[in-house]
Amino acid sequence: MGAVARPAPIQQSFIIMSDSSIRLRPADTPTPQSGYIPYKHSRYWRSQVEAAHNRRPIVSVFMTQKAFVRVNVHATSDLDNEVGGWLIGNWREDQVTGEEYIVVDNCLPAQDVRQGSAYLTFTQNSQVAMFEMMESKFPDKELVGWYHTHPKMSVFLSNYDLFLHNNFFPHPWQVALVIEPHGNTAGFFVRDKHGNLDARKYFGFHELSDDQRRSVVHWTNMKEEFTESLSMMENNNE
Ligand SMILES: [Zn+2]
C-alpha cells in the first residue's frame, strides 16, 4: 500500500475486522510452540538497511524455499497493481536458547482485494475466505503475517500499512513483508521487544532449505551472510 490513506475503506475494514477479533487473537495460542531453531538448515539473507540500524527483531524469520517461490510468483504476477496475501506458518521458541522465531512455509494469496497502483486492502470476503481456508487446509498453522507488493515504489510501510498491521496483525511476532517486483527488492518488518515497528528499517530472513547447495533467493537488496558473522552482529546488538 502506498502513502495515500483512504479513510472510507479503513473504516469499513476496521469494522469488519472487529467482528473477527476473537479469531484473530486465539486464546489457545498464548505461547509459542517448542522447537529447535533451524539455523543449520538455513542461510541468512541480510538486508541492505539492516547494517545501519541497531534493532533486534523480537523473532527471527525463517521462510521455506517453497513459500519463497510461491510468494514471488504472486508478487510478480501483476507489475502494475499491488497484490498481497497472508503468510502461513508457525510461531516457535527454541528449546535450548528460548529464542523466538517464525517459520513461513506457505502463503495464501488474497483473491478478493481492492487494488490499485498504490492501494490494496483486504475485503470482508477475502478475510472470511482466508479464515475458512486456514481452518480447513492449515489447522495446525498460524497466521504469521502478511505480504504485499509496492510496484515501482520502495520497500517501506505506509501509514495505511502500519494501520493494517497494528490492527489486523497485532501479535508481537506477526510480520509484514513488502516486495518491489520490478527491482526485486524486499524486506521483512518485524517488531522489536518493545513492540515498536520502524516503517523504513526492514530485515532479511533465513532461507530454509533441504538443499544447502542451491538458493532460490533473488532479492537484490539482500546479501547472504555466514552464521559466524550473524552471531557477531547479534552479540553487538545486545
Ligand atoms: Zn504498502
Image (cartoon, rainbow, N blue to C red):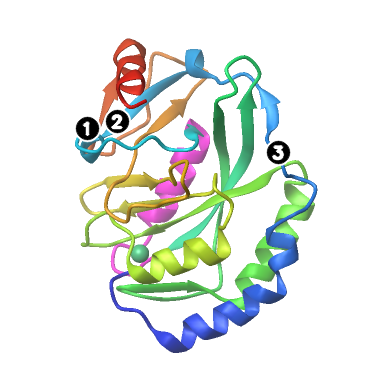
Distance between mark 1 and mark 2 Cα atoms: 8 Å
Relative image position of residue 90 (x, y in whole percent): 64, 38
For ligand 1, tell me if the residue under mark 1 lies within 8 Å: no
Write down the residue under mark 2.
Answer: 46
- SS for callout 3: loop
Q: For the residue with label 3, is its CB less than 8 Å from the closest atom of ligand 1?
A: no
Is disc 1 in contact with disc 2, using a CB cutoff of under 8 Å? yes
Which residue appears at 74% of the width and 61% of the height? 23
Question: N-terminal of the two: label 1 or label 2?
Answer: 2
At x 55%, y 32%, the residue is: 101
Q: Residues within 10 Å of mark 3 (few under 14, many from 20)?
A: few
Outermost residue on the bottom side: it is 8
- Residue 164 shows in this picture: yes
**In the image shown, does 202 or 134 lie closer to the viewer?**
202
| Nearer-the-camera pick, 18 or 186 | 18
**Mark carried by residue 195:** none
The residue beneath circle 1 is: 51
| Amino acid type, callout 2 | Arg
Quadrant of the image where one finds ligand 1: bottom left
Q: Which residues are magenta?
A: 64-82
Q: Earlier in the sequence, mark 2 or mark 3?
A: 3
